[in-house]
Amino acid sequence: MLLTGNIYEELNKAFINALKKSEANRLNIHQEFAAFYNNDYESICSYLREATLNNPFSEETLKNIKFRHVNVIRKIISRITSGIFLKDPVVTLTKKDGSADEALNAIVSSIKFTQKIKEAFSKAVLFNIVEAHVVWDMNSGEMRIDILTPNNYIAETGADYLKKSKIAVRKAGADGEIYWSYWSENEHYILKNGEKIPPPSNKDMVNPYLHSAKAGYALPFAVLRIEEGDDYYGEPNWNIFLHQKNLDIRLTDLNETELKTLHQIYLGINTNFTNGESFKAGDFKQINNVKDDDKEPKIESITANVDYTSVRENIDWHNRLVLNSEGISAASSSTELKAESGAAKVIDELELYEKREEYKSTLYHFMIHLLNIIRVVWNYYNPAAPLDSEGTFDIRFADSRIFESTDEKKKRHDMAIQYGFKDEIDITMEELEISEEEAIKRIKERTNRKSRIENSD
């Protein structure tokens, strides 16, 4: 390489080039994660062909092979994320004067706020990080939330590597052409074919939320990060991803071996058959001109001596190992009917309960940040009906409950009544999730009905 500047300039160029290569590699890795998460079978097959070329399949075998794919990623993620959103969390906005801003409920409902939080959480478990992009659709005049996985955006940071200062989002236009939507605190423009293009209704290419947003909310993106790493993105969940990839390869290898064992492989010795000649039922193959000193023509069947039971047990063992490493009971993937003990179930649920409580804290801060951005975007486009700019958001999750048998629940209720800190009304409200008035009404109705039945007898 020819050096044309001073040593500091050249080192800076080399560093920038290294960053570009590193970023391209990161995008490729996350693109592969996205293929498996989205269950994109064609893309999955291309990644599996690349991984198994000559390891163990030859190039000729890969031309005709059909990969076996059983999606376990969604099952594992579903088990990890279940139990947090037993019901939709209660989202409130308290105005400066202490009253509730009722306009928030309609907005939260229209943008499917809770569903988007669930989607973001599910993706973040695999990718470690996602961005919730609050978008105002100029065509429909409505707001929406796009959940972006890190294969579709590039973030730049400032002094704090965990906080983005710029972000470029990869998008596809109506004509299918790929472009980048670029955002910084001061700018917003479209980058297409290396050329800056003003977005619709923003010819000056200025970030519209620059002056109306509080500090930290000018970018319409809220980040959900499960664990902090050495850079902005952290490390994705290699544990689940590599297990899914390895499982598909093992299942395909097992399937191909079973098929070839079932149909067998034939070895012809001195048969003089033409290349590609096949057999069918009732065929008679005549072999002439065999000399006395020639090897006797014959056809041998080759069968693989494979212990398929051990192979399947090995695959199941790997599956259980990954589940246990994620804090999930191996019984979640078991197809056996043998029941797990009650104590084991309680221990498993306690482990997941603790993990869910940690996730709640992470989700709480993410949701509060997202709500503040929603307010900024909404107020910019709806100045006549704004959300209170000085108000405070709050979120209340439904209580998580660990596994509890009917007998254990009855004992808990009896103890509460015995010690006097609950009565029948409290228990009815808790179990049916109804108001005190409704609980009293139901108890009276059941008491009156029981009395009528007893009197009729």
Image (spheres, rainbow, N blue to C red):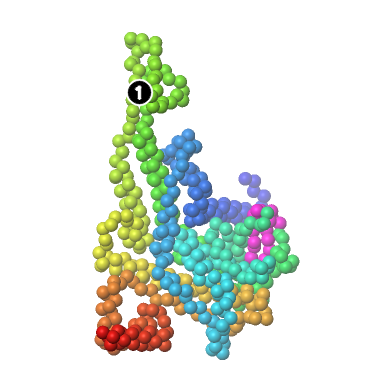
Considering the image in quadrants, where does the C terminus appear? Answer: bottom left
Q: Percent from the top left, x then y, of residue 237?
A: 44, 58
- Judge by depth and name the residue closer to the eye, 102 or 213: 102
Circle 1 SS class: strand
Residue occupying image coordinates x 41% and y 59%: 75
Residue occupying image coordinates x 45% and y 65%: 227
Q: Residues within 10 Å of mark 1 (few under 14, many from 20)?
A: few
Q: Where are the magenta residues, as a range?
A: 176-195
Find out whether residue 189 is within the magenta segment: yes
Q: Percent from the top left, x then y, of residue 17?
A: 60, 52
Q: Percent from the top left, x then y, of residue 232?
A: 52, 63
Residue occupying image coordinates x 65% and y 73%: 209
Find out whether residue 178 is within the magenta segment: yes
In which image quadrant can residue 357 be found? bottom left
Q: Percent from the top left, x then y, of residue 366?
A: 50, 71
What residue does disc 1 label?
Answer: 299
Residue farthest to the right, as pictured: 203
Residue occupying image coordinates x 61% and y 65%: 166
> Mark 1 belongs to which amino acid?
Ile
Mark yes or no: residue 186 visible. Answer: no
Considering the image in quadrants, where does the N terminus appear? Answer: top right
Mark yes or no: residue 401 visible. Answer: yes
- Magenta stretch mostly in which secondary structure? strand
Q: Give the side of residue 452 with respect to residue 188, left or right.
A: left
Q: Give the side of residue 174 with respect to residue 164, left or right.
A: right
- Judge by depth and name the residue closer to the eye, 297 or 17: 297
Residue farthest to the front, as pictured: 456
